Amino acid sequence: MQLRQRALAAIAVQALLCAPCSLVAAEPDLKYDIVFRGGLVVDGTGGEPRQADVGVVAGRIARVGTIPSGAAREDVEIEGLVLSPGFIDVHSHAERGLVQPELRANRGYITQGVTTTVFGVDGAYSLSDMRSIIQTLDAQGVGTNFMFYVGHNGIRTDIMGYDDRAPDPIELVKMRGQVRRAMQMGAVGLSSGLMYLPGRYAATAEVVVLAKEIRRGNGAYDSHIRDPANALLESIRECLDIANAAGVRAHPAHLKVVGKRNFGKSRDIVAMIEEYIAGGLEVTADVYPYDGAAARRLVAILVPPESDPMRQTLRLLEAGLLSEARSIQALRELAAYWQQALRDPQRRAALKARSEEPGTGVFSWIDAVGYESFRVVVSEDPGNVGRALVDIAEERGQEPFDVIADLILAEGESVKITLGAIDEDELRYLLVQPWVMISSDGKITGMKAGGGHPRYRGSFPRVLGRYVREWKVLDLPEAIRKMTSLPASYLQLPERGLVREGYWADLTVFDPETIVDRSTWKDPSLYSEGVIHVVVNGKFALQNGQMTGATHGRFLPSAGINKQ
């Protein structure tokens, strides 16, 4: 509650600063660009909804209250619908698709009601990467606003490649300089991906040194923790300790309890985080509302020999750099390749060893998260669906690798697994914590080929349709707060995240009776339904359920840029 009270206090101060805007907006002769009439306003504070009209002028909310008829260029009747701030996704990989001009409108997010997305997560991007993507998106136009972290993995790769060692003093100075300059550009903070290469080669102390560079701008340290499957609590504690040592805010990303060995630890996680909060550390987290983490076709998790051309095909597939048609073809090629290899006892044994212990510079999901984290989510045999791989192996009296081999031999590329099975009760326990916000961890490409996840196009409507309306895990005002004002406060994003006079008009209008996710493990390409209108910076991106194709999004620097 302490964090929430501080956030609301900050919001109240911002509202006072915007008071002149409100007074101007209330003048009776003012003509509005858009007026939404008769909707139920859920303003993002967590407070009670109220019936009100909302008027928009020059990209901002000019009036929340009663607006006389004839005062707007465009009247939109929304009786029976909910009007809220546009949703803010604090953990997204959508930039990988948005740089393609034909995808720039960001339909997968707009149809969820999302108006702002945050990129550079999991430690992905160096300073030059970050700058290049910002320039590309601003130049070609983009449907949603966006923000950025600078990434430890990207910086380390830029300076040191994939070397498994500590940086020397000169390299560390260069790495610190990249973080500092990124903050001066308006980065939210520093993100790390300590489970991935080359982040997993970094000692905790290295990350602390870099995190200190974001302190001046009150930046946040966001982390894909080091070993969520095998050392869950220790890895979350490392994230909190890094932030504490650096004197910055902590944000363990896409918080979850993955793998059977960790089931039951959600309460330990919450107790640990609240202990740090009580000690003075500001901690937030995000959750996506699904009972499985990253998804992959089973043929895409095995590791080919380094010298084999199939290794490069797999790298391109994993990076999302292949077209959908080429991705589908690549999966078929992988299936044929593995089926041939798995029938040869020597190649099969070598493949098992290489996938379980890949060696320096090689990433393997089997090595990273272990067989206990795998759950089958798509299979031609319905008896496999929803079952943990280790349970199938136990039933058959086999080793887990042999179950993988048998599934590939029988079904080729069609079998899909989640790489991090999650218990639904634990998901719900984390979801309701007051310092937890909503995220998608989503992309906008690769839905039908490879490892598309239903969260990519379903996260926000799923919360409202399932966890609010159907299952009553959250009430509507609190769910909206987790999608709007809480992330806006965390991101130091001024004048957004609330339906308040003087704030930017990032708005979402949805039907509370029909909003829901439609994407599934089998077909994650399905768009959500129930979002009727979306306004980004005062302009329609979605109107009457139809994409307008408008690209009024922009790069939003964190307010920490003013503290440099």
Image: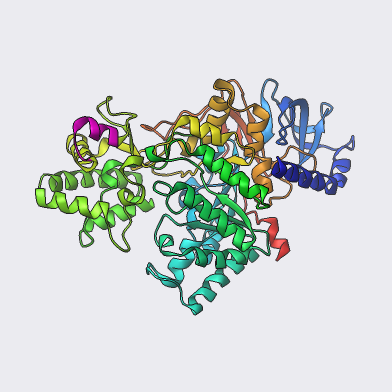
Tell me, yes or no, if residue 504 can be seen here.
no
Specify whether residue 478 is painted magenta.
Answer: no
Q: Residue at x 66, y 56 (%)?
A: 558
Question: Percent from the top left, x then y, of residue 10?
Answer: 77, 47
Dominant secondary-structure state across the stretch colored magenta? helix
Indicate the quadrant where residue 453 lies.
top left
In percent of the image, x 36 and y 42: which residue is there?
A: 419
Q: In this rendering, would 460 be left or right of 96?
A: right
- In this rendering, position of residue 114 left or right of residue 125: right
**Would you place residue 254 above or below residue 48 in this image?**
below
**Colouring style:** rainbow
The answer to whether residue 421 shows anywhere in this view is yes
Report the side of 384 relative to 110 (left or right): left
Residue sitting nearer the eye, 380 or 34: 380
Range shown magenta:
390-399
Side of 477 where 525 appears, left or right: left
Which x, y percent locates residue 28?
Answer: 90, 34
Residue 420 to residue 249: above or below = above
Residue 82 in the image, given as x and y percentages of width and height: 67, 27
Residue displayed at 51% across by 74% down: 172
Which residue sits at x=52%, y=58%?
Answer: 133
Q: Quadrant of residue 360?
A: bottom left
Where, quadrant-wise, is the C terminus in this rendering?
bottom right
Q: Quadrant of the N terminus?
A: top right
Query: Foreground residue, 563 or 436?
Result: 436
**In x, y percent, where is residue 266?**
51, 38
In this rendering, the count of numbered labels is 0
